[in-house]
Image (tube, grey):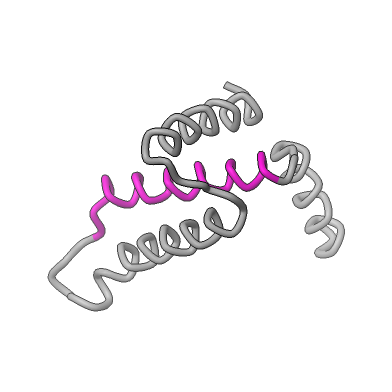
Amino acid sequence: MEVEDLKNKANEFLDLLYKKFNCDHNSTNTVLHLAEEVGEIAREINKPNIRKNEQIDMENLKEQIGDVLILVMRLAKIHDINLEKTVQNKIKKIKEIHNL
């Protein structure tokens, strides 16, 4: 599946979910939700540093990364951003900056 196809599929899902719960996931709400999900990733990654006897729960980490990706795709849709082109351009720019 292409990135833009995945973006469309994620947004179709979110539209159904938001309609069911009668909520408005505009740009501001999406960014706030995204920050929350990134925090959950940080908490999972940091788990072994806080509690030496605990390991990262890979299933939870996968779910949280999935949440982040879906929300990034929502922001991209809201602001009409082509993710594939954006990532390609960013990689090109970083390569130029660092002579890679």
Task: Identify the main secondary structure in magenta.
Answer: helix
Q: Residue at x 81, y 46 (%)?
A: 89
Q: How many marks?
A: 0
- 75 part of magenta stretch: yes
x%, y% of residue 29? 53, 57
* Farthest residue, direction front: 22
x%, y% of residue 73? 59, 41
Q: Residue at x 35, y 45 (%)?
A: 62
**Looking at the rendering, in which quadrant would you find the C terminus?**
bottom right
- 89 part of magenta stretch: no
In magenta, the rendered stretch is 56-78
Q: Quadrant location of residue 38?
A: bottom left
Taking 88 as reference, is 61 above or below it?
below
Question: Viewer-proximal residue, 48 or 85?
Answer: 85
x%, y% of residue 23? 45, 46
Q: Residue at x 13, y 70 (%)?
A: 53
Q: Quadrant location of residue 42?
A: bottom left
Q: Residue at x 35, y 62 (%)?
A: 40
Q: Relative to residue 72, is residue 60 drawn left or right?
A: left
x%, y% of residue 45? 34, 64
